Image (tube, rainbow, N blue to C red):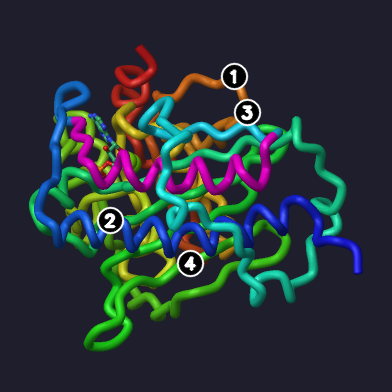
Amino acid sequence: MSPAPLVMRIMASSIAIGNQAGKIIRDIMSAGELGIVDKGSDDLQTEADRSAQRCILASLSNQFPNVRIIGEEGTSDLVNVPSDWIVTDLDQEFLKNKCPDSLTNINEQDLVIWVDPLDGTSEYTQGILESVTVLIGLSVQNKAVGGIIHQPYYKRSSDEFGRTIWGLKGLGSSGYETKPHVQGELIATTTRSHSNELVQSALRAIEPTKVIRVGGAGYKVLQLLEGDAHAYVFASGGCKKWDTCAPEAVLEADGGMLTDILGNHYQYGNDVAFPNKMGVIATAKNVEHMSIINKIPDDVKEKLSK
Ligand code: AMP
Ligand code: MG
Ligand code: MG
């Protein structure tokens, strides 16, 4: 049998890697030595971010040596990675799916893998662990097309933790259940630790019936996928491409949408700038995306574009 198409193998590998990265994140928390460094203002990195990135980058580059991989934590030491961190299996359940026709013949040069080894670091250091996710996003010809969101602290049973959600455009998404929205509600989810006046101004303008403040771009998109919120509203340039590539792909594979505050999709090619300068608006399926975009005040749009 011929091997599965490259895009399918990267997805199947990412699903397997997410579990190992999640285990590393839990093990470091249990050991209690977080090794916190501040990379800027309000931009923390821990030993879990560094180690999970080494696991993910070493595993992906081992299997896909010619694919460009960009990780949040920059260049990592991939030479001395413990051998049990290098994941070589592919998720066989995923490989039972048929590759969407448009993705069967994609060249390595057309791909970029965006890695956020630990999204929600600020919450991780404070023990708010459900917000923590591992994000591996796949862009094809500049567009966010596939990805996984692994949630290391999702409780599967009394002593089993972790779940992996995946999505691939043209195929669909898997790993969660969606509750129906309540008529008349508009629940907005937004940052817990990176708010400012513009973020607040945009939130007020969409007139939500409720605002939830939680950490992590991955976790907020999970809330949209599960029906716990209608819109993720963040009028700030603080999120980066690794924060949104996987969440955008999974959400859009599910029928939702993730764009900047003008309604434009971000580009995820090799040479793009990392910051999502024009903010993030994401909506669950069955929510009219443009109805949220249209409520964002012009002065917020202008201030963010400066
Ligand atoms: P939050 O919703 O605050 O958890 O942010 C989602 C993602 O974007 C996390 O990875 C944050 O670290 C990142 N982020 C958002 N705003 C900022 C900021 N002002 N500075 C640094 N990182 C940010
Ligand atoms: Mg992040
Ligand atoms: Mg991170």
Which tag, 2 or 4, sits closer to the chain's start? Answer: 2
Say which element carries label 1: loop
- Mark nearest the camera among 1 and 2 is 2
CA separation in Å, label 2 and label 4: 17 Å
Residue under circle 3?
269
Residue 36 picture location, percent across and down: 13, 36
Check contact, mark 1 vs mark 3: CB within 8 A. yes
- Label placed on residue 25: 2
- Mark 4 beta carbon near ligand 2 (under 8 Å): no
Counting from the top left corner in percent of width and height, residue 271 is at: 59, 19
Q: Is residue 56 above or below residue 195?
A: below
Residue in front for this viewpoint, 16 or 288: 16
- Badge 2 crowding class, 10 Å Cα cut-off, few under 14, some 14 to 19, many 20 or more, is many
Q: Quadrant of ligand 3?
A: top left
Provide the residue designation for mark 1.
271
Helix, strand or loop at mark 2: helix
Q: Main secondary structure of the magenta part?
A: helix
**What amino acid is at disc 3?**
Gly
How crowded pointer 1 is (Cα within 10 Å; few <14, some 14-19, many 20+) is rated as few
Which stretch did the figure color magenta? 43-65
Which quadrant holds residue 8? bottom right
